Image: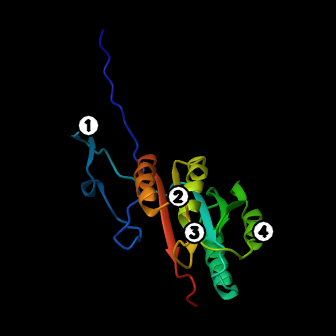
């Protein structure tokens, strides 16, 4: 006796434009899914929000002057308290020459806020090392959608990891479904 079946595979996608802004309003005709070079039928597209495991990496190098740091903290607080859902989980890491995890995965916004208040400025920027070191932490998040947001005011000055190495890591990260975004210039008022 033969029993047939249909395997339904869910694919989570985050679509951004060239400037890194999220694109909304897409439907099945906007996507192509292939498996081993063969196009697969898309049964449907659901644009409902899914919980996210979001890692935040904050630059605390010496160039983050008190006004810059307060602006960065305010932007992070707005994201965490006003834009994320209660079921989203977060961690907070700070970096300069070294990276330190100030708050492990939590959904407790008050706990996260206290960790953000503990961030102290000093040192030089090792952005690439921080990203490389944090990727395994991001991958350990409990939700299917995972992202790392880097908040910095400038360029890498001290990493042992070179940009070319990060490009190779980036390919592997995309395969695992982690979104990495770096945002700088949070010094505007």
- Which tag, 2 or 4, sits closer to the chain's start? 4
Name the residue tied to disc 2: 147
Q: Is residue 74 above or below residue 113?
A: below
Numbered tag placed on residue 158 in the rendering: 3
Q: Nearer the viewer, residue 107 or 156?
A: 156
Q: Cα distance, mark 1 to mark 2?
A: 27 Å
Q: Position of residue 20 (x, y in %)?
A: 41, 70
Q: Give the secondary structure at mark 2.
A: strand
- Which tag, 1 or 2, sits closer to the chain's start? 1
- Which tag, 3 or 4, sits closer to the chain's start? 4
Q: Give the secondary structure at mark 1.
A: loop
Q: Cα distance, mark 2 to mark 4?
A: 22 Å
- Left or right: 69, with 158 as reference point: right
Total tally of numbered discs in the picture? 4
- Which tag, 3 or 2, sits closer to the chain's start? 2
Q: From the image, which quarter does the N terminus lie in?
A: top left
Name the residue tied to disc 1: 36
Name the residue tied to disc 4: 114
Q: Is residue 110 above or below residue 141?
A: below
Q: Nearer the viewer, residue 108 or 172?
A: 172
Q: Position of residue 162 (x, y in %)?
A: 47, 61
- Left or right: 118, with 130 as reference point: right
Does residue 52 appear in this view? Answer: no
Q: Position of residue 62 (x, y in %)?
A: 66, 79
- Which tag, 1 or 3, sits closer to the chain's start? 1
């Amino acid at each position: 006796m033969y029993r047939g079946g249909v395997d339904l595979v869910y694919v989570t996608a985050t679509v951004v434009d060239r400037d890194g802004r999220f694109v909304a309003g897409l439907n099945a005709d906007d996507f192509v899914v292939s498996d081993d070079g063969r196009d697969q039928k898309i049964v449907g597209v659901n644009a409902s929000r899914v919980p996210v495991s979001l890692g935040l990496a904050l630059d605390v190098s010496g160039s983050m002057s008190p006004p810059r740091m307060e602006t960065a903290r305010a932007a992070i607080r707005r994201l965490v308290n006003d834009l994320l859902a209660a079921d989203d989980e977060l961690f907070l890491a700070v970096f300069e020459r070294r990276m330190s995890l100030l708050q492990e995965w939590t959904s407790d916004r008050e706990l996260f806020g206290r960790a953000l208040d503990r961030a102290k400025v000093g040192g030089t920027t090792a952005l690439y090392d921080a990203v490389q070191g944090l990727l395994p932490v991001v991958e350990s998040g409990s939700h299917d959608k995972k992202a790392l947001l880097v908040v910095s005011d400038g360029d890498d000055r001290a990493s042992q990891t070179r940009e070319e190495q990060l490009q190779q890591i980036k390919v592997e990260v995309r395969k695992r479904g982690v979104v990495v975004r770096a945002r700088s210039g949070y010094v505007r008022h």
